[in-house]
Image (tube, rainbow, N blue to C red):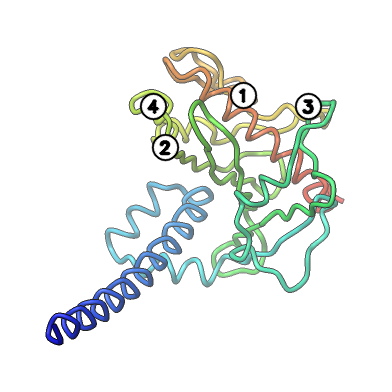
Amino acid sequence: MIFAIAMTLVLGSLLAFVSEGLKEKQQAEREFERKKFILGAALGSENIDQIIKKNKDDVNTIYASRVKDFVVDLDGKTIPDLGAVDVIVLKEYKKLQRNGDDQMEEKDGQNCRLPVYTIAKEGSDDVEFYVLPIYGFGLWDNIWGYLAVQSDFNTVQGVIFDHKGETPGLGARITEREVQNRYRGKKLYEDGGALASVVMQKGEGADYSSEPHKVNGLTGATITGVGLNIMVKDYVILYSNYLNSLKK
């Protein structure tokens, strides 16, 4: 009996130790994935993958030397003493609701916080790209990603999309590099300054290379595409006060 109790205590302690070690490792992997996505949106996921193949630690070095982060409110004002890493985008997304104009706004009593990541030019303090976390809903569950915008606050430098439960081979294709690369060089605003966003079209196979606000769709994944369109437009609007303050 005493032996059994002792073994239970020993095994319990070992399991707790292993669990804590795994928790730290998992947290480190999540943090690395976040950095990889942020850099990938702006610098190209294919370039980041090549860097990882050579030396994974270089990603952390590039991130530390070129990326700064902060948080703004819906008025575009910086929230002091708060880092982007401290903000869980899903929790902020739940603070929002649609108004009569079908735009997202804060629920009563809620203060939505929007993380911002800036990426400086290599060897300089000048900001080259702005990376904005975005969140929405696809066919079955939440979708999310990062939208990188050039310093003209209009041209899409790149995107990273991910999902929780879209259909494999259909909506889940939003994670594919070829699909994400369709957004490169597209424009968020029309020449007159009106918001046009970037809209994934229904169906696949058409040529939208000369269309600044359109990208090819996903065969058999119309609803996921609609979710992407809503997500991108929603967050361009949510960040608009911040982006407009930079233009001024």
To which quarter of the image does residue 82 belong?
bottom right
Packing grade of label 1 (10 A; few <14, some 14-19, many >=20) is many
Q: Marks 1 and 4: which is nearer the front?
A: 4
To which quarter of the image does residue 55 belong?
bottom left
Packing grade of label 4 (10 A; few <14, some 14-19, many >=20) is some
138 left or right, relative to 28: right
What is the distance, in whole Å, between disc 3 and disc 1 at their CAs?
17 Å
Q: Which amino acid does label 1 sit on?
A: Val
- Residue topped by disc 4: 167
* In the image, farthest residue toward the front: 1
What is the distance, in whole Å, between disc 2 and disc 1 at their CAs?
17 Å
What is the distance, in whole Å, between disc 1 and disc 4 at their CAs?
20 Å
In this view, 12 is above or below 240 = below
Quadrant containing the N terminus in the rendered view: bottom left
Q: Earlier in the sequence, mark 3 or mark 2?
A: 3
Residue 18 rendering spot, x and y as whole percentages: 27, 74
- Label at residue 102: 3
2 left or right, relative to 95: left
Residue 49 rendering spot, x and y as whole percentages: 34, 52
Q: What residue type is labelled 3?
A: Asp
| Viewer-side residue, 127 vs 233 | 233
Tell me the residue at 38%/47% (across/down).
46
What is the distance, in whole Å, between disc 3 and disc 2 at their CAs?
27 Å
